[in-house]
């Protein structure tokens, strides 16, 4: 597995504790629906209904980071069971006008993707780009 892109971030409205859960709300999955799960530990992550297209790209996009690693991501409006690592940065963002932060599985700490936060008022103000290879159900 390739190393994650180094980045830092804080959870909106939360202190800058990198271990703070990103979303502690109840599950977004309907009973009996598997949706997206962590490929490492099978933890629940998101529902199919949370898939979002944030640009002219489709809801599944492929991007290359500055180190040359290819990441195929699915974009989502909501997730559960993720933790952010560090502070946000707009450097090398795949989405103009958004800063990004590493997002790991809260259960096993596997790198699942990134949270993207708008740098100025826009819609969506926050969304997630999760690595397809790190999820099941994609």
Image (tube, helix red, strand yellow):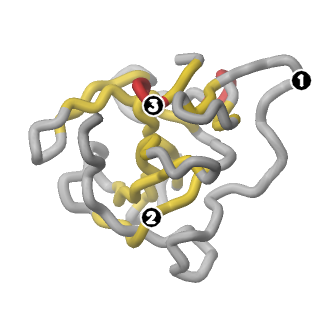
Of callouts 3 and 1, the N-terminal one: 1
Which x, y percent locates residue 18?
50, 72
Residue found at the very far right of the displayed protein: 31
User: Which numbered marker is on residue 134?
Assistant: 3
Write the residue at 79% across / 30% down: 29
Q: Which residue is mark 2?
A: 85
Q: Which disc, if any, is residue 31?
A: 1
Percent coordinates x, y for residue 54 in the rendering: 44, 35
Q: Badge 2, how many Cα within 10 Å: few under 14, some, many 20+?
A: many
In the image, farthest residue toward the bottom: 15
39 or 77: which is nearer to us?
39
Q: Is residue 107 left or right of residue 56?
A: right
Relative horizontal placement of residue 77, taking residue 24 as reference (left or right): left
Rounded to the nearest whole Å, what is the CA distance between mark 1 and mark 2? 30 Å
| Rendered residue at 35%/68% (across/down) | 8
Between residue 51 and residue 34, name the one nearer to us: 34
């Amino acid at each position: 597995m390739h190393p994650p892109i180094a980045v830092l971030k804080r959870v909106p409205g939360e202190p800058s504790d990198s271990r703070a859960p990103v979303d502690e709300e109840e599950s977004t999955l309907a009973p009996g629906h598997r949706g997206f799960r962590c490929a490492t530990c099978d933890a629940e992550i998101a529902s199919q209904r949370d898939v979002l297209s944030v640009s002219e790209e489709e809801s599944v996009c492929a991007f290359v980071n500055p180190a040359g690693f290819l990441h195929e991501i699915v974009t989502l409006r909501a997730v559960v069971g993720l933790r952010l690592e560090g502070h946000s940065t707009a450097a090398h963002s795949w989405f103009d006008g958004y800063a990004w932060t590493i997002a790991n599985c809260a259960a096993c700490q596997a790198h699942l993707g990134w949270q993207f936060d708008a740098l100025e008022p826009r819609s969506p103000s926050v969304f997630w780009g999760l690595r397809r290879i790190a999820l099941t159900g994609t």
